[in-house]
Image (spheres, helix red, strand yellow):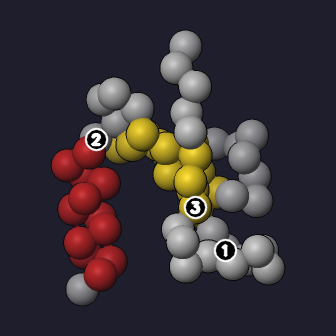
């Protein structure tokens, strides 16, 4: 099993709050709640992940 290296957005501080982390897999992008690292993960195709990011930026 691949080990995912999780990363949080650089804009996120250390004060807690609503942060997500992303991790890259060979065929997917994983997303999780930084406050619940053992909780559910959302797996997205790279195309879907980029589409979501572009939509959020608009």
The residue at the point 29 percent across, 64 percent down is 52
- As drawn, the residue found furthest toward the bottom would be 58
The label number, if any, that marks residue 8 in the structure image: 3
Q: Secondary structure at mark 1?
A: loop
Does dot 3 land on a helix, a strand or a loop?
Answer: strand
Q: Residue at x 42, y 40 (%)?
A: 24
- Residue 44 in percent (x, y) is at 35, 43
48 lies above or below 2: below
Residue at (54% x, 72% y) in the render: 10
Q: Seen from this angle, which residue lies furthest front?
A: 10
Residue found at the far top of this picture:
1
Q: Nearer the viewer, residue 43 or 11?
A: 11
Q: Which mark is residue 48?
A: none
Which type of secondary structure does the marked residue at label 2 adopt?
A: loop
Q: How far, Cα to Cα, is label 1 from label 3? A: 11 Å
Instruction: Tell me: residue 11, above or below residue 6.
Output: below
Instruction: Identify the residue position indicated by label 2 in the image.
Output: 45
């Amino acid at each position: 099993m691949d080990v995912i290296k999780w990363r949080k957005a650089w804009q996120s501080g250390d004060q807690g709050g609503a942060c997500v982390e992303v991790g890259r897999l060979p065929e997917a992008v994983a997303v999780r709640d930084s406050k619940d690292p053992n909780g559910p993960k959302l797996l997205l195709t790279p195309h879907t992940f980029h589409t979501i990011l572009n939509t959020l930026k608009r």
